[in-house]
Amino acid sequence: MEKKLKKLKKINNLLIEYEPQLKEIRKIFFRSLFSFIIGASIGLIFNQKIILVLMSLFDLQKVNIVLTSPYQFINLAVGLAIVLGLITTIPVFIFYLLKYIQPALKNEEYSLIKKLIPLSIFLFIFGCFFGAKIEQYVVSLYAQTTTNYSLSNFWDIESFLSQVMIMSVTMGLVFQLPIILTILIRVKILTTHMLTSQRRYVYSALIIFAVLLPPTDILSLIMITIPLFILFEGTIIFNRNFHYN
């Protein structure tokens, strides 16, 4: 009984000691949750318009888009709400997280992270666009092939749009690779020498990742992996003059 009381006292003392930090973490959580609710609400309210815009980005004249279940639009609306919720949450979470950890960072480290944020946003948007273009290429190739062979094709709208959203957001996140590696190098967790010496393993991991993404043809695989290799090598070149103090 005494041991349990001692443990409870320790826990209570820790809670009192770290109460300011816990309050800040709680604030970050609720602000992020609020931004997620806003993004998700936009996705739910305007889901029809967003879906129509997404479909207009692709040349679907030679493709028959079909609805196989009355619940598919509900599933699409929910999926779209989650994606938009996450997209709106990530910037808010990063902003308040940076404010929280700022005292623990050196001035040059904090300054570097602030400078990298605009680049991170650009890379995310470009990655999403690039992922959508790959899907567009696959659609055009498949539609043309079925036309050449005089075949009819029917595509499930939920599967098609879900794949487009997953591919776009995934590529947007993967294009954050230079940002993550640069921060790890500047805070002295990694070195450019370490990355170059492990290049073949990094390349292997990137290829495996590309294989797991939705388009399964060899051309799509090449289109995905080459930009990832370029981002990796560009990160090494960008940071090669960085030296530890």
Image (cartoon, helix red, strand yellow):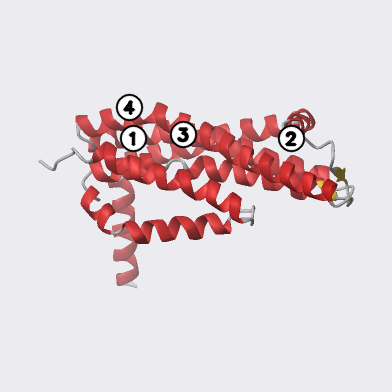
Which structural element holds mark 2? loop
Residue 123, numbered label: 3
Q: Amino acid at mark 4?
A: Lys
Looking at the rendered image, the disc whose residue lies closer to the viewer, 3 or 2, is: 2
- Classify mark 4: residues with Cα within 10 Å, few (<14), some (14-19) or many (20+): few
- Point out residue 134 in the picture as x, y percentages from the top left corner: 62, 42
Quadrant of the snapshot with the C terminus: top left
Q: Residue at x 35, y 73 (%)?
A: 1
The answer to whether residue 160 is visible is yes
* Nearer to us in this view, 186 or 62: 62
Q: Earlier in the sequence, mark 2 or mark 1?
A: 2
Q: Are marks 2 and 1 in contact (CB under 8 Å)?
A: no
Which structural element holds mark 3? helix
Q: Residue at x 30, y 45 (%)?
A: 18
- Classify mark 3: residues with Cα within 10 Å, few (<14), some (14-19) or many (20+): many
Looking at the rendered image, the disc whose residue lies closer to the viewer, 4 or 1, is: 4
* Nearer to us in this view, 18 or 161: 161
- Classify mark 1: residues with Cα within 10 Å, few (<14), some (14-19) or many (20+): some
Q: Amino acid at mark 2?
A: Phe
